[in-house]
Amino acid sequence: MAKREQHHRLIDGGKLDKFGTIGFNRIDMGKHTPGAYQEWVDGKKPLGSLGLAHLSILDTSKRWIQPNRNSWLNDNDDWRKPHSIEIIAWTAIGINVDNWVKFIEPTDEYHFHLWAPDISIQFLYHNCHNLVLPDLYLMNKQELKEKYDISVNSTKSAAEGNDFHFGNPNNFKLWKKRWGWDYEVPQTIPDVRQSYEGTLIEEFISHDISSGPLKTFDLGEY
């Protein structure tokens, strides 16, 4: 069966109905996922960047779920199954529109940055998992931006005043107001765990992610 038909079966068969956002296995030319692109070309199934462990990893150098930051990913095959993640790698994002209408409170105070993390956390607050599909690969070739005189580093460029391409810089004050912890200071997250008791936010804060995903899902072929 063609991959395209398999993907449609996931949607038409209702297998994605319970999820919030849908993320992919993001690879690049080597900056963040060294060797992954060539492995993919060779017909292998490498793990690239699967998402952001914003709640369960407090070391900011290791929060991106990718092998060059966390070598234990390749030791556990559960990461190769569809699984729940705190925040998907939002280079590209699938959104369950029905659950968006049901759960999400949008704001225009985020521009280019932090909007996707905020949505992911809102879904977790409503006990709606964000799903990664590791067999669906996404190429993130940031170098193409330079061809059009766009900065490769959007965060730095926005902070330097490039609101034409990237809007206002990260609105960390709004994040803290909405969620109670400092986005840039992960050590503030455990302090609010009790406030989120009974939600997936609390479950991820308490989860030892080095042991594997919080939850995996059997979706059949896709």
Image: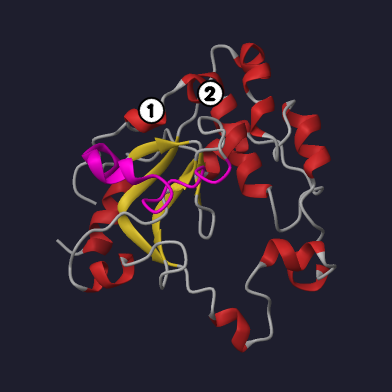
Image-based side of 84 in relation to 99, left or right: left
Tell which of 31 and 168 is nearer to you.
31
SS at mark 2 in the image: helix
Q: In this view, does 210 lie to the left or right of 222?
A: right
Single out the mark in the foreground, 1 or 2. 2
The stretch drawn in magenta includes residue 76? yes
Above or below residue 144? Residue 128 is: above
| Image x and y of residue 165, in percent | 74, 72
**Which numbered circle lies on residue 81?**
none
Q: Where is residue 193 in the image (x, y as percent from the top left)?
A: 61, 16
Residue 178, image quadrant: top right
Q: Tag 1's secondary structure?
A: loop
> To which residue does mark 1 refer?
214
Question: Magenta residues?
Answer: 60-80
Q: In which quarter of the image is the N terminus?
A: bottom left
Which amino acid type is shown beneath numbered disc 2?
A: Ile
- Whether residue 206 is in magenta: the answer is no
Tell me what residue is drawn at x 80 percent, y 61 percent: 159
Is 162 in front, or is 101? 162
Q: Which residue is drawn at 27% across and 50% down?
A: 9
Instruction: Tell me the residue at 42%/54% (across/down).
Output: 49
Q: Compared to 32, does 88 lie above or below?
A: above
- Judge by depth and name the residue closer to the eye, 123 or 214: 214
Image coords of residue 200 (percent x, y): 51, 23
Residue farthest toward the bottom in the current orientation of the protein = 147
User: Residue 97, percent across and down?
Assistant: 54, 45
Mark 1 and mark 2 lie on one chain; the one further toward the N terminus is 2
Q: Residue 205 carries which label?
A: 2
